[in-house]
């Protein structure tokens, strides 16, 4: 009789461990996601809204309230900024620039950036602002 009993396998799947791992991954994602976003903290000045047509030849120059200059999302020292603008104009004669400046940045810094862009020979220039609230 002992040989006649069949061993039965367990048909249930224990998902408790899977749920635990999933919850830990979800918590890690929630905590890390805001840190992954790498943006430039700017508060644009208010102005009447108008749409800027950005194309593939467009480059964004951002100036933070501390006077730091960014070309797209890469920080550039002011000495190297003029060279980078010259190189952009040489490689792409139809390049356009969108300048995003924080409303608290010193006016002299913006003038320096605009002067470097003008000296490079870039004539297509837009100033980014935010709409009035």
Image (tube, rainbow, N blue to C red):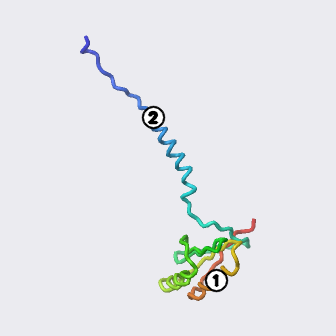
Mark 2 lies on a secondary structure that is loop
Q: Residue drawn 51% across and 82% down?
A: 88
Quick one: label 2, few (<14), some, or many (20+) residues within 10 Å?
few
Residue 22 pos. (x, y %): 49, 42
Q: Quadrant of residue 55?
A: bottom right
Judged by depth in the image, the label closer to the viewer, 1 or 2, is 1
To which quarter of the image does residue 11 belong? top left
Q: Provide the secondary structure element on which disc 1 rests.
A: helix
The residue closer to the viewer here, 68 or 9, is 68
Q: Quadrant of residue 116?
A: bottom right
Task: Give the residue at x 49% y 84%.
Answer: 87
Q: Give the percent coordinates (x, y) of residue 30.
A: 56, 49
Tell me residue 29's x, y (percent): 53, 50
Q: How many marks?
A: 2
| Comes first in the chain, label 1 or label 2 | 2
Can you identify the residue that label 2 sits on?
Answer: 15
* Labels 1 & 2 near each other (Cβ < 8 A): no
Residue 14 is situated, as x and y percent measured from the top left of the image, at 43, 32
Residue assigned mark 1: 112
User: Please, which residue is most extreme toward the top here?
Assistant: 1
Q: Which mark is residue 67?
A: none
Q: Quadrant of the N terminus?
A: top left
Marks 1/2: CA distance?
A: 62 Å
Quadrant containing the C terminus in the rendered view = bottom right
Query: What residue is shown at x 37% (from left), y 26% (from top)?
Result: 10
19 shown above or below 123 = above
- Please tell me which residue lies in front, 97 or 52: 97
* Label 1 packing within 10 angstroms: few (<14), some (14-19), many (20+): few
């Amino acid at each position: 009789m002992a040989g006649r009993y069949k061993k039965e396998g367990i048909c249930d799947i224990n998902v408790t461990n899977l749920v635990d791992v999933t919850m830990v991954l979800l918590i890690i994602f929630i905590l890390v996601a805001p840190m992954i976003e790498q943006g430039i903290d700017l508060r644009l000045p208010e102005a009447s809204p108008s749409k800027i047509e950005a194309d593939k030849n467009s480059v964004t120059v951002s100036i933070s309230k501390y006077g730091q200059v960014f070309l797209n999302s890469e920080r550039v020292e002011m000495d190297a900024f003029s060279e980078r603008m010259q190189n952009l104009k040489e490689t792409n004669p139809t390049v356009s620039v969108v300048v995003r400046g924080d409303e608290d940045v010193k006016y002299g810094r913006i003038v320096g950036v605009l002067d470097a862009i003008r000296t490079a020979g870039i004539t297509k220039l837009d100033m980014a602002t935010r709409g009035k609230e």
